[in-house]
Image: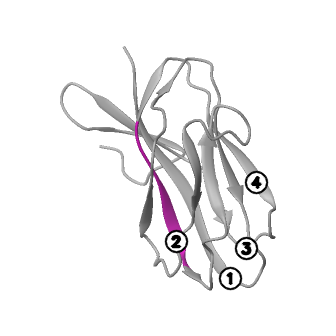
Amino acid sequence: MAYGLSQDSSYKASRNSTHKIVKSVWFNLDNGSGTTIDDVLLVPPSDITLISASIVYVDATSGTVAAANVSVGTTVGGVDIVAATAYGNSKTVGSTTALTLAANKVTAGTMLSVRHTGIAATAAGQAYVQIEYTVDK
């Protein structure tokens, strides 16, 4: 089992499958109203199946941060994997917001990208997007 997750960490979910987790950079939620930051999560060398996606809060959110959002797609700013989803207000460190997968297959050589859209500097909080996946065989 891998401890201290890095950018792409593996752990054994069962004897027959290996699940992996990939994380985005930390996003400062109040980086400016409508300001976007794009982060390439990975370009898999093999086909992958997405299991789950979530926002993980690494700093408590304060103020109204729900105007900020994240999306995940196979193009920069894409929403084909996860539609734009608002951050949660009043989140504590370590809490999560589940993201709904609109699609769960990513073919080899296809970029998986996350877009953060910020809010004005009147709110606070930091978070990253985490995706769990398996490598297709």
Q: Give x and y (percent) for residue 90.
A: 50, 82
Q: Say whether disc 1 or disc 2 marks the residue closer to the N-terminus.
A: 2
Q: Mark 2 highlights which residue?
A: 88
Q: Give x and y (percent) for residue 22.
A: 51, 43
Q: Nearer the viewer, residue 58 or 120?
A: 120
Does the residue at mark 3 contact the one at mark 1 (Cβ under 8 Å)?
yes
Q: Say whether disc 3 or disc 2 marks the residue closer to the N-terminus.
A: 3
Counting other residues with Cα less than 10 Å from the Cα at mark 3, is it few (<14), some (14-19), or many (20 or more)? Answer: many
> Disc 1 versus disc 2: distance between alpha carbons?
12 Å
The amino acid beneath tag 1 is Ala
Counting other residues with Cα less than 10 Å from the Cα at mark 4, is it few (<14), some (14-19), or many (20 or more)? Answer: some
The residue lying at 20 percent from left, 34 percent from top is 14
Q: Mark 3 highlights which residue?
A: 30
Q: Give x and y (percent) for residue 107.
A: 54, 19
Does the residue at mark 4 contact the one at mark 2 (Cβ under 8 Å)?
no
Q: Say whether disc 4 or disc 2 marks the residue closer to the N-terminus.
A: 4
The amino acid beneath tag 3 is Asp
Q: Mark 4 highlights which residue?
A: 37
Q: Mark 1 highlights which residue?
A: 123
The quarter holding residue 72 reads top right
Magenta residue span: 51-60
* Farthest left residue in view: 15
Placement of 114 over or under 81, stated as above or below: below
The amino acid beneath tag 4 is Ile
The residue lying at 48 percent from left, 38 percent from top is 102
Name the secondary structure under disc 1: loop
Name the secondary structure under disc 3: loop
- Tell me, for residue 78, which label it has, or none: none
